[in-house]
Image (spheres, rainbow, N blue to C red):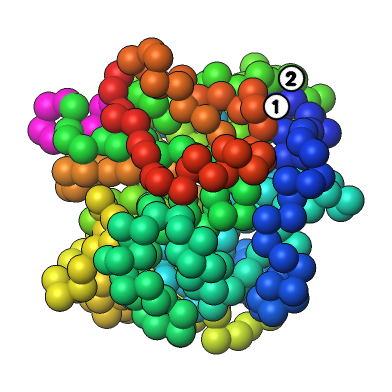
Amino acid sequence: MVHQSITDDQSSQRITETSTDTLNFVPEEIWESLNALKPSSRTAFVSAAVIPQLIPQFRELYIQGVTTCAYLCSLSVDHVATGLLDLGWGCGYRNCQMLLTYVEAYQKPYSRIIRHIPDIEGLQILLEKAWADQFDPQGAEQLKHRVHRTRKWIGTTEVYTILTYLGIRCSIVDFATPSGPNNAHDALFDWVQRYFEGADTDIVPADTEKTEQHTTITDRPPIYLQHSGHSRTIIGIEVLPDGKRNLLIFDPGKRVPQANHTEKSSADAKVPDKVDSMSDPAAKPSSTVSGGNGWWFFSGWMNWQPLFGNNLRNIRVDSKTISRNKQYQLLVLGDISSSSNTLPWTDARGYILDAQEREQRKKITSVIGSR
């Protein structure tokens, strides 16, 4: 059977458990000037909600003995696609938008911390506003205090700055070196698995056949994943019969099949399957791990694959693939406790900052990932 996490009402409380006075960090006139993300960039608009489509896929793999179990983030999280105009540089913005689909879904109409999900230009405006308000002065200096209407890459620290400026609590975890044999990032996989396994779950009425006990849907937010040259969004983790694991990832540069689309636009262009190729060596990264896609999209253009195939190849990322990069950063909504070497995640204080916390987070900090 499919397992479902605690209710949407409980998740909503985490978004809104604070005084409404703290929800007005961004003036209304700024929100009115920001264009919303085009619906055609969101998979749920052109097709159907994405994560529910994964459950039958994992059911089939479980029946075949290919997988043991999978843990997935909140059903509300949407895949946001790269468009023609941001090919090669927009992944940081697109993954930020995916995080915001979670916030958008769970906030209450009467206490909205975000009025809508901004398009890329809107996120650029918010980033510059944050810099002007003395958020992350070092990052602002690196990017010369300007990103609006440019193709400059952004990375983890810029996404952190945007979210914190909005008043959203988030944390950064650094995995600066491999932690396993053959450059494997076992510590990263361990942390992600604990993050999803730690969710409280209730069983949703469903098929009670034993062979259906394969997928746990949690209420957890997705995780922003950064490495040199690209960023993606972790939506879950899969455990295989031999103990190996796959990260389950939404990549803004990988698409749903064109046959499923109900509307086509410039945002619906096909993008190649390969994403871990070279990045632009001339561009200076703005974070510990840089944020751009480089020019990978030109290579293998004709080898594009749809997002969902029978083997879920475009969202399953194994340890060998992750080992190609030496450094990773995670950004997650909520708090990370550094008092334990397992760096437990908590949402006990909710996802909304008060004014004092927001001020304290203008200087970016991170914790070092460990087992």
Which mark, by number, is residue 5?
Answer: 1
> Secondary structure of the magenta portion, mostly?
helix
Quickly name the residue at label 2: 202
Query: Where is 68 relative to 178, above or below?
Result: above
Does residue 186 belong to the magenta stretch?
A: yes
Q: For residue 354, say whether it is visible.
A: yes
Q: Residue at x 31, y 70 (%)?
A: 143
Query: Where is 49 relative to 269, above or below?
Result: above
Give, as a single range, the part of the protein colored magenta: 180-189
Q: Earlier in the sequence, mark 1 or mark 2?
A: 1
Task: Please identify the residue farthest to the top as the structure is shown.
Answer: 340
Q: Which amino acid, mark 2?
A: Asp
**Mark 2 crowd level (few <14, some 14–19, many ≥20, 10 Å Cα):** some
Residue 312 location (% of width, % of height): 46, 49
Q: Residue at x 68, y 20 (%)?
A: 201
- What SS does tag 1 mark? strand
Task: Please identify the residue farthest to the right as the structure is shown.
Answer: 110
Q: Which of the pair 166/106 is nearer the observer?
A: 166
Q: Residue at x 39, y 76 (%)?
A: 146
Q: Residue at x 35, y 37 (%)?
A: 366
